[in-house]
Every structure is written in C-alpha cells, then in structure tokens.
Image: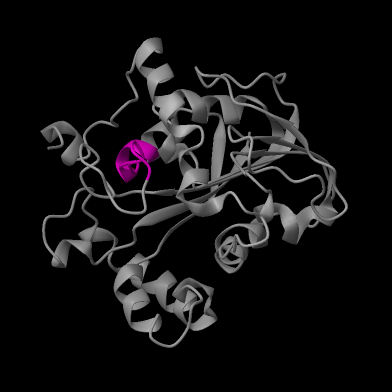
C-alpha cells in the first residue's frame, strides 16, 4: 500500500532516495521499458506525434536548433517531425536495445544516463531539450529536472510530458507498467519548475478519460484514441475544464475524470 504522504501527492516517492536506493531503482528500470515489448524497432509504433505537435512543437520558434538533447528518447521517434530543424542531436538512453543509427538526416550521438542522474554536458550546451514520458521512471525527479534546465542555454527550450497521477499502487505489480514508475503530483511539479530559471511558455493537461475512450475505440481500430484529431481537441478542453477534479491517487471513478498528464513547454531565462 502506498504511504499516505505519497498517495495524497504531498511528496514524490523516490525524490529523497540515497545513492544506494537510486542505484537499485536504476538497475530495475534500465531495460524495463524495452522488456515490455519495445525492443523491436520495426514493430514498435510511436503514437504520440499529434499530441507532441498540439502541446509542444507548435510553441517552438521557427528556427534551426544548433544542438538538441533527447533525454530517454530510445529510438528517437519523438524527434522525427522536427529532425530537419536540428543540426546536432544527442540522446541519453539507458537501454542497449533501443538505439537508431539515423533519425531523419541526423546521426544521433548516444550515451547512457548516470546512476545519480547527472548529465555530463556543460552548462547551457543545448538550445532544445526534450524529455517526454521519462522522468516518472526516475527516482530523484527534482535533481534530474534541474540538470535538464542546467544544460539548456539561455533562450533555449525544454519540452516535458509526464503523468501527474499515481498510475496505481506501485508497491504491487501492475500490468503494462514497469516496477517503479509513478506520476509526479502537479503542485510539486509546478514548485520544482518555479525553482528553476525557466519561463513556462505553455502548461497543458491531457489524456482526460483516455483509458475509458480507448476501450470503446479499440472495437474499431488498433490505433490509440489519442491519434485522432477530434479526440485531442476534445481532450484539450476536457482536461482544462476538469483540472479542479485532479486527484493524484484516485479512489473512485469520479476522481479519474481529469487530465492524467501534463505537457510543458519551457524557455530558459
């Protein structure tokens, strides 16, 4: 059972771990996502392009980015729609099984994350950083976010997308999820970002009732419901209207009627 302070979203589980606890978590998670069925590039289907455009890429300036960092980007699919706008791409990825030799016209430079979460690049090295659905797999959330901000140069952009719900009781096995992943409570997420030298260009909640609609939609298509333009626009407004009903660890169906994730576009000051 989840401890009360975590279930109520008053603290992030893992954020205060010591180095031995972080290492144990790292060892468990490094290949966990790949082992869920994402090892084969030819059969893996990246289905988040439209939501990335709606809540992320459209807020980026029309310019060429000199150096990009895709944190935890695996094959690098998330970069494909803007690959022609990046001159040099670096990817930090723990899995040895999920790496691409080429992404569009880019030949990415891969490296593995450090156990403690330090990013071994100089301050202000990148003018674009993406980290989409990754940080909730990491214990020391606030430190890793501070590192992503540190390596972004002034005027550079950071895109983050993470769940803001518990994702169920992580103290027991959950189907389709890795052992340790859990969402980041939205008030704490906002507090962490407020402590960084960044401007919030856009904050958007998303994936409102996506599981419910997916169960219905799966009768007609194998594609996820969030690949539909109509759903995404409906989701955008429903997530905004139901923000007041957001509960980190929902205990009833009613409490689940809210956006399940947040999408941030940040600009380094």
Choose top left, top right, bottom left or bottom right for residue 25: top left
Give the left or right position of residue 137, taking residue 12 as reference: right
Give the position of the C terminus as an image quadrant: top right
Residue 211 picture location, percent across and down: 32, 69
Does 195 appear above or below 219?
Answer: above
x 66%, y 55%: residue: 41
Q: Is residue 121 visible?
A: yes
**Magenta span contains residue 81:** no
Does 85 appear above or below 123?
Answer: below
x 71%, y 53%: residue: 79
Closer-to-camera residue (204/117): 117
Residue 197 picture location, percent across and down: 56, 29
Does 253 appear above or below 98?
Answer: below
Choose top left, top right, bottom left or bottom right for residue 21: top left
x 43%, y 17%: residue: 23
Give the left or right position of residue 93, taking residue 108 as reference: left
x 83%, y 56%: residue: 104
Q: Is residue 202 visible?
A: no
Residue 163 picture location, percent across and down: 38, 50
């Amino acid at each position: 059972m989840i401890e009360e302070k975590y279930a109520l979203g008053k603290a992030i589980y893992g954020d205060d771990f010591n180095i031995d606890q972080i290492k144990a978590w790292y060892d468990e998670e490094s290949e966990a996502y790949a082992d869920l069925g994402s090892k084969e590039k030819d059969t893996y289907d990246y289905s988040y392009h439209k939501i990335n455009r709606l809540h992320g890429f459209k807020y980026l300036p029309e310019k060429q980015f000199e150096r990009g960092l895709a944190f935890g980007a695996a094959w690098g699919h998330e970069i494909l729609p803007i690959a022609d706008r990046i001159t040099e791409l670096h990817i930090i990825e723990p899995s040895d099984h999920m790496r691409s030799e080429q992404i569009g016209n880019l030949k990415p430079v891969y490296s593995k994350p450090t156990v403690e979460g330090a990013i071994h690049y100089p301050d202000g090295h990148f003018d674009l950083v993406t980290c989409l659905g990754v940080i909730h797999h990491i214990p020391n959330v606030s430190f890793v976010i501070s590192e992503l901000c540190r390596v972004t140069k002034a005027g550079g952009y950071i895109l983050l997308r993470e769940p803001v719900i518990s994702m169920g009781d992580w103290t027991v096995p959950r189907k389709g999820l890795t052992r340790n992943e859990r969402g980041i409570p939205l008030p704490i997420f906002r507090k962490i970002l407020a402590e960084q030298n960044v401007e919030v260009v856009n904050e958007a909640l998303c994936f409102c009732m996506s599981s419910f609609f997916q169960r219905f939609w799966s009768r007609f298509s194998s594609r996820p419901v969030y690949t539909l333009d109509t759903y995404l626009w409906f989701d955008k407004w429903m997530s905004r209207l139901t923000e007041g009903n957001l509960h980190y660890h929902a205990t009833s169906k009613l409490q689940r009627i809210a956006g399940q994730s947040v999408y941030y576009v940040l600009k380094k000051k």
